[in-house]
Amino acid sequence: MNSLNPISRIDFDKAYEDHSRVVFRVVRSIIQDPGLAEDIVQDAYLRLFKSIELITEPEQVRPWLIRV
């Protein structure tokens, strides 16, 4: 029996490619410094990696990243 959460097998490169622009735009609407906005987006992906067990469906990735 495979005990891994389905999202734990997510392709993080694909998740970044699929969602990073939207996440960056949301952050930039709040933070005017583009460098700081990039750092925040990277931090969000690091948090995603560390908290992957909280996400049960691939469709939850983008909302989770924006909320973080």
Image: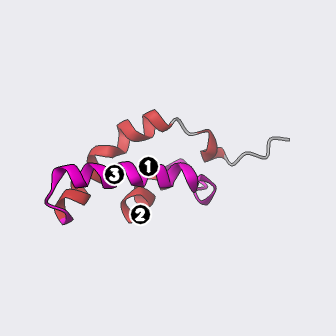
Name the side, left or right, on which 5 lies relative to 25. right
Q: Is residue 6 left or right of residue 17?
A: right
Counting from the top left corner in percent of width and height, residue 45 is at 43, 49
Amino acid beneath label 2: Val
State the residue position of label 1.
45
Quarter placement of the C terminus: bottom left
**Circle nearer the N terminus (1, 2):** 1
Query: Mark 2 or 3 closer to N-term?
Result: 3
**Split into 4 quadrants, where in the image is the N terminus?**
top right
Where is residue 56 shown, x and y percent of the image? 61, 55
Instruction: Describe the element under mark 1 as helix, strand or loop.
Output: helix
Residue 7, percent across and down?
60, 46
- Name the residue that disc number 3 marks: 41
Q: Identify the residue position indicated by label 2 in the image.
A: 68
The residue type indicated by label 1 comes to Tyr
Q: Which residues, given as a range, are shown in magenta?
A: 30-59
Q: Is residue 8 left or right of residue 49?
A: right
* Separation of marks 1 and 2 at Cα, in angstroms: 9 Å
Q: Nearer the viewer, residue 37 or 55?
A: 37
Residue 24 as seen in the image, left or right of residue 54: left
